[in-house]
Image (spheres, rainbow, N blue to C red):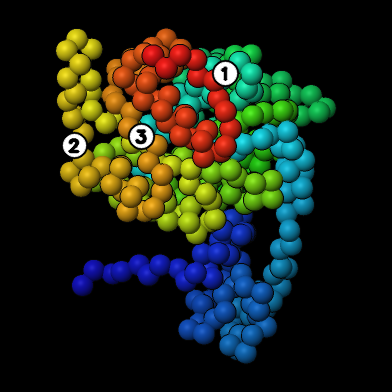
Amino acid sequence: MAPSLVADAPSSEQDVLANPISSKPALVAPEPEHCPGPESETAGKADGCAGCPNQAICASQTPKGPDPDIPLISARLAGVKHKILVLSGKGGVGKSTFTTLLSHAFAADEGKMVGVMDTDICGPSIPRMMGVENESFHVSSSGWSPVMARENLAVMSIQFMLQDQDAAIIWRGNKKNGLIKQFLKDVEWGDLDFLLVDTPPGTSDEHLSVNAFLKESGIDGAVVVTTPQEVALLDVRKELDFCRKAGIRVLGLVENMRGFVCPKCRHTNEVFRATTGGGEKLAKEMGVEFLGSVPLDPRIGMAGDYGESFFDEFPDSPAGKALRGVVRGIAKGLRVEVDLGEDG
């Protein structure tokens, strides 16, 4: 019989969500059957700890109080009206591409200020797609100044800190968490209408850190991206479950790469077939808003490679029109108005 992994108890999950950076003490023996947990408040003090070789180690652990940097983060982000996470449990579904498209769509309204924070520490692609990969940020006594992709669109990413853009970033969780905290605490975001947070796939360190650091200042919601295949939907279900457990409001689900529209005959070819109903059916099953489907368009990939705005260059394409519908859905969920120009 294959071994099974039992999910953590709800209390353990909540502890991880509340304290994403805490680390387990180094024990000298396995945890006994009735162990209260080496990171719990009663560690080393409970009746079950008597006679345990780890008792002194656990008892010496000082309970971690509130993070003193949280108020500083809240103060730094006081001018940010709306904070939106872009999530997906699956890699390769187009989160970073969609974040870029979304940022350009919001920034098309010249009256709005938009920021993009790249928390994909090990695979930062936002700077390339925003056309600012060769830029660097300025550091002053008041903080870090983000790179401006356009007059009303600011970007921050670890890519701006690398001397060799092809160098692998081999970091453990705590170091990633520390940089994410700096992006929130030290960057001069100023007055923004929208701060979009691009995340790596999964529900691990980066997601836990962003959720914990923004808990006090508030996350307005998450946009979850998927593709039509069941293989992608499997992981997206887990991401939606993460949002529920973490108390993150889901603004809606976006289905990316749904069909290829021929530019000549306008016939739609289902390249990635929705074998189990796709994103729309999943949204209904999970009780979240379905924001729409965005079709495949090779020009989206080309725009990302060249650091150009697909939304500005091809607003009347099927993908451009679909994207406008997604943006309107997000704006409606936030109860804000965004001027996207002509409907096309």
Residue 274 visible, this orientation: yes
Q: Which residue of the protein is positioned furthest toward the right in this rendering?
A: 141
Task: Tell me the CA gap for discs 1 and 3.
Answer: 21 Å
Check disc 2 and report the residue beneath it.
Answer: 273
Q: Residue at x 42, y 9 (%)?
A: 313
Decide which of 321, 51 is in the foreground and name it: 321
Label at residue 292: 3
Kindly state the secondary structure of the residue where label 3 is placed: strand
Percent x, y of residue 198: 51, 35
Percent x, y of residue 225: 39, 38
Decide which of 108, 69 is in the foreground and name it: 108
Crowding near the residue tagged with mark 3, few <14, some 14–19, many ≥20 C-alpha atoms within 10 Å: many
Compare marks 2 and 3 and give the one earlier in the sequence: 2
Check disc 1 and report the residue beneath it.
Answer: 109
Compare marks 1 and 3 and give the one earlier in the sequence: 1
Decide which of 156, 234 is in the foreground and name it: 234
Q: Residue at x 61, y 69 (%)?
A: 39
Crowding near the residue tagged with mark 1, few <14, some 14–19, many ≥20 C-alpha atoms within 10 Å: some
